[in-house]
Structure formats: structure tokens, C-alpha cells
């Protein structure tokens, strides 16, 4: 009985949890209570993932404690807090008014007459272009890699370290992605949908659940793709930069999906990353960086 349920969940858990999060958040938007419904959906999905990680893990060894849960949670809080504070502060100091003229309907090239569903797809593809390059630059340029290394230093993947990003990297990424949408004049509702979509896809990319994502891995960023991205082998790790979609990875030649074999269970970076949150925040400013993961793979391989 347990195996039948596990087999069904194996194929349905990923799309079902994503759909649940999107539908409940959508209901919240219609009812005018977006934040409340989003939070209910968000914490329900986290709880469901934690349970599934317990009963049907992808890697059993990732169930062991890494003693870094406080750091994971503090990074998640500081990243999300900074982004929300920035939006609030932007309103207070008048940044919103400054950029509003760009996004008023008359001055915008955004196709507001399209059905919302198509506008959201267009928004996702546009934002994804910026997210793709922000992520790829973080791997190919030493200065940005120092910040991104905080994320890649994890030794296991699970839902709790999905938001482990240096808060300065998260801020840079969100400003980068939003700038294009603002210039194009995307309405707030589209930005809202993209934020919701990114939040749920993000929760699911790190989940340690044995899920089969099949053809979905040719459209969306899934845990099966993201596990390769955490590989210490640069031929696998410097791939799959997409945040939500894989379109730009496919177009720019960084899509990697060897689904017939398992990605490595041993993940991380070659450099030493201190385990404490504050030391990790200071890490990009302190160390003479031993650039093993970031940077151009060909350059690294030829120097071995
Ligand atoms: Zn990365
Ligand atoms: Zn990751």
C-alpha cells in the first residue's frame, strides 16, 4: 500500500504542490487578501514537503543534520526581509513615483489587452531572461561568485535551505529582474504572479523528495535539474541557471539533464565556508577566494 502511494506521489507531488500554491494564492488575489492566502499556501507547501522528505527522500544521506539550520533560516529571513524592506523603502522615498511614469499604460509597450494568463507567461519569460543572466554572471565572475558561494556551500539539499542566499545577492537579483518588467511597463498584477510563481518553484527546487518530473523538466526548473546545478563537477554545476523556466538555458546552451543517471550526493564548494550566519555574511569581503566553482569551466579544467 505504502509503495503504491509513494509511486503515485512520485509523479504527482511536484505538479500538485505547485498547482496548490498557485491556485490558493490566486484565490487570495481575487478575494483581495493576497498576502494572507499566499502565506497559508506557502507554509502548507513547506509542511507537505518536510513530510514527503521524511517518507520518500531522494537522497537518504541528506536526511542527516548539517547543523546549519539556524544559518539557513537567518539567510532566508534576511534575504526576504531586505527585498520587502526595499520595496517599502522605495515607496517611502518616492522611488515608486519616479518609475511610475515608465509603467503608466500610455507610455508602455506592454500588451495590457492580452488575457492575464498570456501576460503572466510573457512576464515570466522576460523576468527569466534577467534571472538567468544574474545567476550565470554569479558563476562566471569572481566578485559575484563570492556572494553566490554562500548558497552553493550547502552539503545537502532540502526545503529549509532553499532560501539560503546572501541578502546582497538576493537584492541584486530582484532589482535586476524587476528592472526589465518596469521598463516594459508590466502591470502590478503580472509582477505579483511572477513573485508567487518564483516562490513556489523555489521551494520545490531544493526538495529532497524522490519525484519524477519527466517532460516538466523541459519547461520548468525542477529538483531533478537543480541537483545537477549543485554538483562540484563544473561540467554539471555550471549548468541549469534558470530560476523558473529552462528556456534560456536551452537557447544559451547551458541546459543539462542526464536523467538516466543519478546526480552526485556529495555537493558543495571546494573553498571553506564558515558554518555561522554572520561569518557567512562577511565571507565575500574577507577571503582571498579560491575560485574553484565559479568562473569559466574551460579555464578551470585547463588549469587542473
Ligand atoms: Zn548557482
Ligand atoms: Zn540551489
Image (cartoon, rainbow, N blue to C red):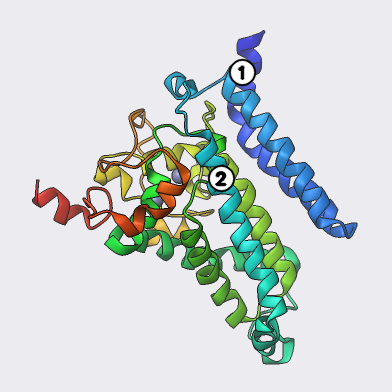
Which residue is the extreme one toward the right? 31
Residue placed most toward the observer, 283 or 261: 283
- Disc ID at residue 247: none
Image quarter where the N terminus lies is top right
- Which secondary structure lies at badge 2? helix
Q: Please, is residue 223 above or below residue 7 in the view?
A: below
Residue placed most toward the observer, 261 or 128: 128
Instruction: Give the crowd class for mark 2: few <14, some 14-19, many >=20 residues within 10 Å.
Output: some
* Between discs 1 and 2, the one toward the N terminus: 1
In percent of width and height, residue 109 lies at 63, 85
In percent of width and height, residue 17 lies at 68, 37
- Is disc 2's CB within 8 Å of ligand 2? no
- Provide the residue designation for mark 2: 74
- Which secondary structure lies at badge 1? helix
102 left or right, relative to 286: right
In percent of width and height, residue 19 lies at 71, 43
What residue do we see at 65% from left, 81% from top?
A: 185
- Provide the residue designation for mark 1: 6
What residue do we see at 36% from left, 32% from top?
A: 263
Residue placed most toward the observer, 244 or 284: 284
Residue 22 is at least partly visible in this image: yes
What residue do we see at 45% from left, 23% from top?
A: 59
Nearer mark to the viewer, of 1 and 2:
2
In percent of width and height, residue 179 lies at 55, 76
Residue 240 is at least partly visible in this image: no
Amino acid at each position: 500500500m505504502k509503495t503504491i502511494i509513494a509511486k503515485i506521489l512520485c509523479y504527482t507531488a511536484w505538479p500538485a504542490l505547485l498547482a496548490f500554491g498557485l491556485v490558493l494564492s490566486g484565490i487570495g488575489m481575487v478575494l483581495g487578501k493576497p498576502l494572507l492566502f499566499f502565506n497559508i499556501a506557502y507554509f502548507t507547501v513547506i509542511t507537505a514537503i518536510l513530510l514527503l522528505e521524511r517518507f520518500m527522500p531522494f537522497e537518504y544521506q541528506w536526511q542527516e543534520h548539517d547543523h546549519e539550520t539556524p544559518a539557513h533560516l537567518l539567510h532566508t529571513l534576511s534575504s526576504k526581509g531586505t527585498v520587502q524592506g526595499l520595496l517599502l523603502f522605495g515607496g517611502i522615498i518616492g522611488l515608486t513615483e519616479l518609475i511610475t511614469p515608465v509603467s503608466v499604460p500610455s507610455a508602455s509597450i506592454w500588451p495590457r489587452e492580452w488575457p492575464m494568463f498570456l501576460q503572466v507567461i510573457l512576464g515570466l519569460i522576460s523576468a527569466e531572461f534577467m534571472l538567468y543572466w544574474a545567476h550565470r554572471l554569479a558563476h562566471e565572475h569572481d566578485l559575484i561568485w563570492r556572494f553566490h558561494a554562500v548558497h552553493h556551500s550547502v552539503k545537502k539539499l532540502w526545503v529549509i535551505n532553499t532560501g539560503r542566499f546572501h541578502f546582497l545577492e538576493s537584492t541584486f537579483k530582484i532589482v535586476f529582474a524587476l528592472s526589465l518588467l518596469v521598463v516594459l511597463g508590466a502591470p502590478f498584477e503580472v509582477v505579483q504572479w511572477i513573485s508567487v510563481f518564483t516562490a513556489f518553484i523555489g521551494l520545490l527546487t531544493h526538495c529532497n523528495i524522490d519525484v519524477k518530473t519527466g517532460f516538466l523538466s523541459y519547461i520548468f526548473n525542477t529538483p531533478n535539474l537543480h541537483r545537477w546545478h549543485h554538483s562540484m563537477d563544473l561540467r554539471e554545476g555550471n549548468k541549469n541557471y534558470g530560476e523558473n523556466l529552462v528556456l534560456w538555458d536551452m537557447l544559451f546552451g547551458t541546459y543539462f539533464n542526464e536523467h538516466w543517471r543519478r546526480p552526485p550526493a556529495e555537493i558543495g564548494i571546494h573553498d571553506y565556508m564558515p558554518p555561522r550566519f554572520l561569518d557567512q555574511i562577511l565571507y565575500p569581503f574577507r577571503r582571498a577566494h579560491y575560485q574553484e566553482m565559479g568562473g569559466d569551466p574551460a579555464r578551470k579544467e585547463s588549469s587542473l
